[in-house]
Amino acid sequence: MAVLTTNYPTLGDLVSRLDGEGKIAPIAEVLNQTLPILKDLGFIECNKTDGYLHTIRTGLPEPTWRKLYQGVQPKKSTTAQVTDTCGNLENYAEVDKDLVDINGNTAAFRLQEDRAFIEAMGQKVAETIFYGDTAKNPERFMGIAPRYDRLLSGTKPPASSRNVVNFGGKTSDGNLTSIYLISHAVFHGIYPKGSQAGLSKSDKGQVTVIKDDGSLFEAYRTHYKWQVGTTLDDWRGCARICNIPLAKLLLSTEDAKNSREQLIRSLIQAKNAIEPKYLSRTKIYVPRDVMTVLEIAAVEVSHNALSITQAGQQFQANFFGLPIEICDAISTAEAEVK
């Protein structure tokens, strides 16, 4: 599994620095095993109390050809300020005290019981990294898909639509999905100013739990909290191939084979849409079935562009040198991008 280098500390880096005794390290390991996007994402601290403010250049100053003895009007570039915010994800785990005490190793047993809660929070954050939309759910944070959710057509499409490649599938084709090319030079995780990055764990100790019927029992309670968001410095550093009809691509027909070839061409188009200076930090994220489609395409036709290499006990897919990673957080039931 390829690991991208990053100028910003990753979740694992921050955890190891903040907790010298490594008490939270097992949590980071659980997240890494199931959610590779969190392993790759660099985290930076917000520069405002309510979010991360950054300035985007929207226009360049127009130079002037000057004739002798004629002046030139001063010009300036145009910019826009954008603030990305964090969402606050929380959960509580409760384990019956007697069950823990019988086990003997209290701390290790509680971590095993809490594992499901940790993984659920990680999956929710990863899902929101792709699909969070503060226009629809203001309590969450803005993900990558809503930033690339318009095709380059119609009235005044956003600039980012230039990096949206339409594969051509329709809602009538069945389940649709996308491939995301993300440069970690421009797409980062953020966390609130004055706090720490990542999933925090607070042991509430022994508590009395009151059930709905009024009965009581003693339990150990753990509180999990994750304040997190994402920010995009430059829309030219990422791309999306949308409207991919999975069912058609997985068939053993000549039309399906041609569609798989078309997917390779779409990958080339998306790769070339990204600003070249960002490509060295770019990774391609695909759902599991799309990885199957790409591997079938690699077997069907010898592609120098698409390669599968073995590293130890693992196989790594690459496209023109860009690592391809399976990410289960990518939905295979996306809405059609229009």
Image (tube, rainbow, N blue to C red):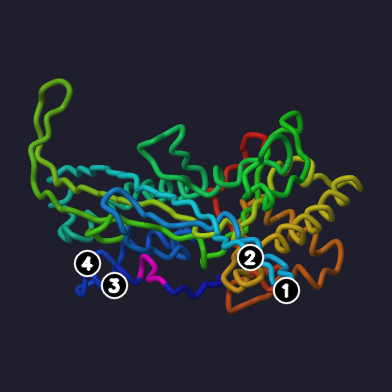
CA distance separating discs 1 and 3: 64 Å
Left or right position of 200 against 319? left
- Residue 254: x, y in percent? 91, 48
CA distance separating discs 2 and 3: 56 Å
Given contact means CB atoms under 8 Å apart, are the residues at marks 4 and 1 in contact?
A: no
Q: Secondary structure at mark 3?
A: helix
Q: Earlier in the sequence, mark 1 or mark 3?
A: 3
Q: Which residue is mark 4?
A: 23
Left or right position of 63 against 115? right
Which circle, 4 or 3, is nearer the viewer? 3
User: The residue under label 4 is which amino acid type?
Assistant: Lys
CA distance separating discs 4 and 3: 9 Å
Given contact means CB atoms under 8 Å apart, are the residues at marks 4 and 2 in contact?
A: no
Q: Which residues are magenta?
A: 8-12
Label 3 CA crowd tier, 10 Å (few <14, some 14–19, many 20+): some
Residue at point 29%, 68% (across, down): 15
CA distance separating discs 4 and 2: 64 Å
Disc assigned to residue 68: 1
Q: Nearer the viewer, residue 182 or 161?
A: 161
Against 241, residue 195 (above or below) is: below
Q: Which residue is farthest front?
A: 69
Q: Earlier in the sequence, mark 2 or mark 3?
A: 3
Name the image quarter holding the C terminus: top right
Given contact means CB atoms under 8 Å apart, are the residues at marks 4 and 3 in contact?
A: no
- Is residue 330 found inside the magenta-colored segment of the image? no
Total numbered labels:
4
- Residue 317: x, y in percent? 67, 68
Q: Secondary structure at mark 1?
A: loop
Q: Which residue is mark 2?
A: 72
